[in-house]
Image (cartoon, rainbow, N blue to C red):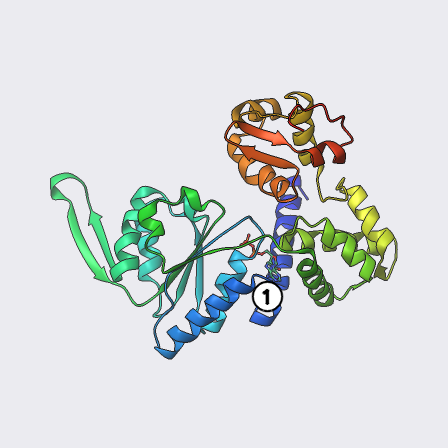
Amino acid sequence: MSTQDKKSQSGSEEINFEKALRPTAWDDYIGQEKVKQHLRLMIDAARARKEPCDHLLFYGQPGLGKTTLAYLIGKEMQTQVRSTSGPALEKPGDIAALLTNLEPHDILFIDEAHRINKLVEEVLYPAMETRTLHLIIGKGPSAKTFSLDLPPFTIVAATTKANLLSSPLRSRFGAIFRLEFYDVKDIEKILTRSAHLLGVEITHEAKKILAETARFTPRTANRLLKRARDYAQLYRKNVIDNTCAEETLKLLDIDEFGLERADRDFLEILIDKFQGGPVGIRALGAALNEEPGTIEDVYEPFLMQIGLLQRTPAGRIATKRAYTHLKKDHKSPLF
Ligand code: ADP
């Protein structure tokens, strides 16, 4: 089997694994209580009126449960969820084809909504507002506009970058929800459920170790559990215990805060090359050989969440906690 085949096999394995663990009932969707409460209210009201739910936007870090919510809403509203993503919608015809194929009350889930291009957005505005599709066929003076009524439907969009969504698009959603990082207790509950679904036994201590290093993110927690299960299987253990959890983390080069090698490199460069900051994102990006966008999306949210990094108007700063964690001398004049 070629490397490419292996990669795509492990990619589809990962997708199947996610699907298998995805909660399909409100009670299994742990945490995010306020979001759940508000959504249930909206869904119950819409159902009572026999109308589709308002268009919804979820934003927050990857792996926090945005897609899961879209499918849960579909289940609650007893309707189909069709799925696409911002980058897949290249031209107005792409979104038009999806919208005209919707059945009444269907949900259209659009992931990575901040990557929808302007031309596609312009088709979406009237579609979301008045359920009409306006399309221009042809070019120049012979171009023709035609309009089509669409069935009642709901757009559920998800993004990691709500600030990049244009304000006309944002204003067309009936409700906007921010998904927060999870607390460790909730991540433990998610691990309990996932272990049960995977048919593996895990001790309380092992669960605690994995939960504390899961970056407050369900997807990461499930992935760590899967790796720990592999480890247990390899060493013929029938239960994931603390040794198994610790060895798995060691193998993955994840420390007790949940930092991976790349996170530690990021902080080390900030401390060693820029005296802990403040430093601008471009200079940091150049030193790390990473795009500023990747730094903002991938590294920073978690490092800020655990208090190792601060974003200030003057630039990024490594906190005292970061120095202590990486066992660096506190040379920064900031503390
Ligand atoms: P996102 O769309 O925000 O990137 P997903 O909805 O795909 O995240 O969630 C990733 C995985 O994490 C899901 O497959 C699911 O198993 C798990 N998950 C997410 N949120 C929850 C939750 N609140 N409770 C239990 N499991 C969750």
Judge left or right: residue 77 versus residue 268: left
**Looking at the picture, does residue 283 appear above or below residue 99?**
above
The one nearer the camera, 324 or 211, is: 324
| Amino acid bearing label 1 | Tyr
**Res. 286 image quadrant:** top right
- Looking at mark 1, is its residue's CB closer than 8 Å to ligand 1? yes
- Residue drawn at x 61%, y 47% as measured from the top left: 8
Q: Position of residue 17 (x, y in %)?
A: 65, 58
Q: Position of residue 15 (x, y in %)?
A: 60, 55
Q: Position of residue 43 (x, y in %)?
A: 43, 71
Please identify the residue farthest to the left as the structure is shown. 141
**Looking at the picture, does residue 116 appear above or below residue 134?**
above
Q: Position of residue 208 (x, y in %)?
A: 77, 56
Classify 10 Å Cα crowding around label 1: few (below 14), some (14-19), many (20 and above). some
- Residue drawn at x 66%, y 33% as measured from the top left: 319
- Residue drawn at x 60%, y 61% as measured from the top left: 19
The one nearer the camera, 32 or 193, is: 32
**Residue 87 visible in image:** no
Judge left or right: residue 264 versus residue 16: right
- Residue drawn at x 22%, y 60% as measured from the top left: 148
Residue bearing the label numbered 1: 29
Q: Quadrant of ligand 1?
A: bottom right
In what quadrant of the picture does the C terminus appear?
top right
Q: Secondary structure at mark 1?
A: loop
The one nearer the camera, 66 or 6, is: 66
